[in-house]
Image: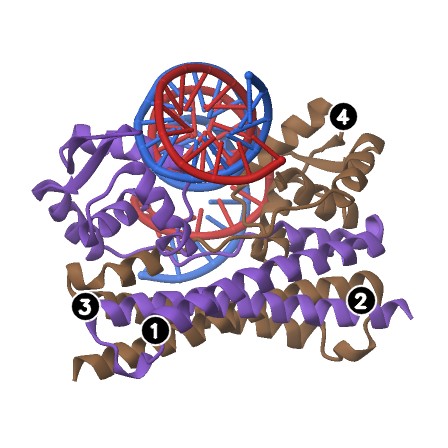
Chain colours: A purple, B brown, C red, D blue
Amino acid sequence: MALEHAILVSLTERAGSGYELARRFDRSIGYFWPATHQQIYRVLRRMDEAGWVKHTEIAQDGRPDKKVYRVAAAGRAELSRWLAEPEDPAVLRDGLGVKLRGASLGSVELVLKEIERHRAEHATRLEVYRGIQRRDFPKPSGLRGRELHQYLVLRGGVRAEESFVAWCDEVIEALRKDNR
Amino acid sequence: MALEHAILVSLTERAGSGYELARRFDRSIGYFWPATHQQIYRVLRRMDEAGWVKHTEIAQDGRPDKKVYRVAAAGRAELSRWLAEPEDPAVLRDGLGVKLRGASLGSVELVLKEIERHRAEHATRLEVYRGIQRRDFPKPSGLRGRELHQYLVLRGGVRAEESFVAWCDEVIEALRKDNR
DNA sequence: GCTACCTATGCAACCAGTTGCAGTGCACCT
DNA sequence: AGGTGCACTGCAACTGGTTGCATAGGTAGC
């Protein structure tokens, strides 16, 4: 599995608390590996116990103390081990496809509405990603190394959402036509 | 959740045993909702207890007996309830993105190889889907109702794999260029 | 004759992800 | 003064998915 590894990648780039990591996930690694704060906290504790990360408690005023985590030697070792290991290719898992498949057993009208809703959702995410792209990578042609990799990951998010939106459009058009 | 519902959709189209369902999932609903046979058996038993499906034991010679399941009234009711309910839009979850993001912490060479491997895998799946498309839907323009829906679901699978392959190609080219 | 794979079912243990809740204290708005 | 929202941590229960194993006869290849 990979939440451990996603966290290690993120922590290697920059040390941080569980909360900060959860925020970071929301707008970077998270579009390839979403995670909630509870999950992150639990995995951080586990990795701390295993010696993959170390934490320093930091008192803050006006705010609860936070634990800032850094990657330890064992964590770096685990990360390179994992990076060299093959990964299972991702599979699609989308309940919307099941709904469409079963549409004629219920109301095709309602399923169509649902697809329009998903279309809007995916279009919103797409706009968010494009915004990040414009802001953080205005000139992609000059990118190298780590920044290039980050950009390419973002491109994956953009492509995935584009493809969702295009599929929804195809479905919406076909269902409307069938309905006439 | 939706494995229950995916099974109900499939069983409504045609009654079948757990094993048959697992095969069907492998080449139809499964590209939107993958499931293993163990999972399917467990859910079938649960649905049987809940009265959503009924089974008939069928003796076969030279082969183990099988239980053929059919959807019961309660199952049809549950299915329409679910079809009318909103569904959370799907999120991408792909460890390959995490690996790419962390590539510079290990061997970029190795990650590149891994991406080429995934590219090949996705291209294979894509070819499988396109084969099904050619065989089962040679003339998509005339499709209506349930068949149209099935075709559109397949189109989703095709689009998703196309998008994966295209992304891999973009990444491979960019990493090669960066390496020179 | 042995290995391996296919049909067919299923249990048990485990692992990962989700949901709901709880508590602290500041800042900001009404 | 009261409500909302944010920063920050965390537990507990649950649900769903994965993996490994067991059983059993038939077919196919070496």
| Both marks 4 and 1 on one chain | no
| Chain assignment, label 4 | B
Most foreground residue, B9 or D21: B9
Q: Quadrant of residue A90?
A: bottom left
Do circles 4 and 3 both sit on a common chain?
yes
Kind of residue at badge 2: Leu
Residue A137 image label: 1
Q: Which residue is mark 3?
A: B108
For label 4, the residue is B51
As drawn, the label of residue B168 is none
| Quadrant housing the C terminus of chain B | bottom left
Q: Is residue A19 left or right of residue B179?
A: right
Residue B110, image x, y percentages: 19, 66
Decide which of A11, B77 is in the foreground and name it. Answer: A11
Give how far apart the Cα atoms at labels 3 and 2 are: 45 Å
Kind of residue at badge 1: Phe
Q: Is residue A30 visible?
A: yes
User: Which badge, 4 or 3, comes first in the chain's sequence?
Assistant: 4
Q: Which residue is mark 2?
A: A175
* Identity of the residue drawn at 72% across and 60% down: A116
Identify the residue at image location x=61%, y=32%.
B43
